[in-house]
Image (spheres, helix red, strand yellow):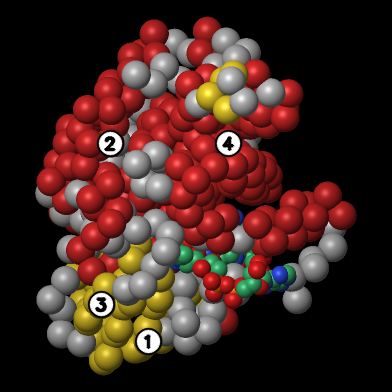
Amino acid sequence: MYNGVDFFHLSDLFSEEEKMIVQTVRQFVDEQFLPVVVPHHRAGTFPMELIPRLGELGALGVTIPEQYGGPGLSHFVYGLVMQELERGDSGLRSFASVQGSLVMFPIFSYGSEEQKRKWLPVLASGEKIGCFGLTEPDFGSNPGGMLTRARKDGDQWVINGSKMWITNGSIADVAVVWAQTEEGVQGFLVEKGMPGFEARTMEGKFSLRASVTAELSLQDCVVPESNRLPGVKGLRGPLSCLNEARYGIAWGAIGAASACYDEALAYARERVQFDRPIAGFQLTQHKLVEMLTEITKAQTLIYQLGRMKDNGKARHYHVSMAKRNNVAMALDVARSARTILAANGISDEYQTIRHMLNLESVLTYEGTHEIHTLIIGQEITGENAFK
Ligand code: TGC
Ligand code: FAD
């Protein structure tokens, strides 16, 4: 039974409601997600039957107000939920963060009233699934160079282009597609079945296997003007969505790290070599102490960021520091835990290797580790080192 990792009693600073939400999501992960994750990870599929349950838990669009079907909770709670989900698997957290931060957030922030009423309640309940198409085959870190174009034609738009590495792409009912227009980058709600729109699942991933990743193709895809997000123009539209998702990832990574630490600690206490538990060797203790220290430092960072986000004081570079630090920390913890489990550490009978492989994606998506270095570097020096 997982009881969380909380060496500095940070949960003493949580409200009763926050503690209760942690317990509820933790129980869901233990009882409903972990028993099914290994076959899904092996098959490269997402447990679709759990999507309505995620909706019931309020895990889809945590901060979306009740009038649009969301639970209307704080950013701090959103973070706690992401942490608990990613303790199960980064793919589970990915599903929820794409749906909430990358699909519901732009519809809520930049959509028309009609778009909000049509989409937000069904996305919150999990009846409908969304995806976010920004990355292209030749434009990942530099989305400003995107080739996807939307051309106005009367009261509709004609979109041409392709998007790659899109989480939930081939299971989505609606894709938030970002395209270059004469007035800058704009967002369009491209619905499943619209002529000229196709989504193909990408095969062969060795990471984030319990998550669907797809390529989107738009060939003279006709989208009505009523499906354009009217509230934003320019690259700041998609980048503002990324702030929300990166924030959730910075929390989530701690969940993945905690799962690995918890598993390595339990294993070290049980596993006997040279007539004593391996936990009794100084080198193993050093690894465990480093893991716990880094998890604890990440927790204190995210605790403050969470409160800043709810006070309106978090800026994109704060989010970059948390995403950059916490994901790299989690990957280091996972790799170190893997060495404690040794041969068993490469078997999916244990969670660690799954988390470790997942975290390779998490290090890359939502802004690579290097891109976040440059975002923070630009903030502190005033120099743009991207171009
Ligand atoms: P730049 O000239 O700096 O900025 C263009 C406009 O955007 C504004 N801006 C932001 N606005 C809100 N939030 C941010 N974080 C922003 N960063 C910049 C900026 O003020 C400007 O606005 P305006 O009004 O003056 O025009 O843009 P740039 O082209 O130089 O690019 C900057 C850079 C490199 C930091 C940016 O492109 C970037 O972040 N690249 C990384 C791309 C990325 O993270 N892609 C993620 C794709 S989605 C994904 O990975 C989902 S994974 C899902 C899952 O499964 O969990
Ligand atoms: P590139 O941009 O080609 O980068 C290659 C290398 O060059 C990296 O190490 C990078 O850090 C480095 N680099 C690039 N520019 C610079 C620079 N200026 N200075 C120094 N180093 C630099 N995208 C979406 O839009 N929606 C999704 O739902 C989505 N889901 C994803 C799911 C998975 C499993 C994965 C793996 C990716 C997903 N992505 C998604 C795409 C992801 O956001 C991109 O992979 C990421 O932004 C990096 O782009 P790239 O892979 O093209 O790498």
Left or right of 80, for residue 173 = left
x%, y% of residue 365?
Answer: 51, 60
Which of marks 3 and 1 precedes in the sequence?
1
- In the picture, the quarter occupied by the N terminus is top left
Residue 34's label in the rendered image is 2
Say if 35 sits above or below 359 in the image: above
Residue 340: give its label: 4
Q: Which mark is residue 64?
A: none
Q: Quadrant of the C terminus?
A: bottom right
Where does residue 264 sit, x and y in percent of width and height?
A: 52, 30
Q: Secondary structure under badge 2?
A: helix
Relative vertical location of residue 244 with respect to residue 44 in this rendering, above or below: above
Which of disc 2 and disc 4 is earlier in sequence? 2
Q: Residues within 10 Å of mark 2 (few under 14, many from 20)?
A: some
Instruction: Tell which tag, 1 or 3, sits nearer the viewer.
Output: 3
Q: What percent of the width, then of the height, locates residue 374?
A: 74, 60
Q: Nearer the viewer, residue 170 or 125?
A: 170
Between the C-alphas of marks 4 and 3, the distance is 39 Å
Q: Secondary structure at mark 4?
A: helix
Number of the label disc, if any, that sits on residue 161: 1
Q: Are marks 1 and 3 in contact (CB under 8 Å)?
A: no
Type of amino acid at the residue the image marks with label 2: Leu
- The crowd level at tag 4 (other Cα within 10 Å; few <14, some 14-19, many 20+) is many
Query: Which mark is nearer the camera, 3 or 2?
Result: 2
Q: Mark 3 is on which residue type? A: Arg
Amino acid carrying mark 4 in the image: Ile
Seen at 16% across and 71% down, the residue is 192
Q: Residue 72: percent from the left, percent from the top?
A: 32, 30
Q: CA distance from mark 1 to mark 4?
A: 46 Å
N-terminal label among 3 and 2: 2
Q: Are marks 4 and 3 in contact (CB under 8 Å)?
A: no
User: Is 325 situated left or right of 190 in this image?
Assistant: right
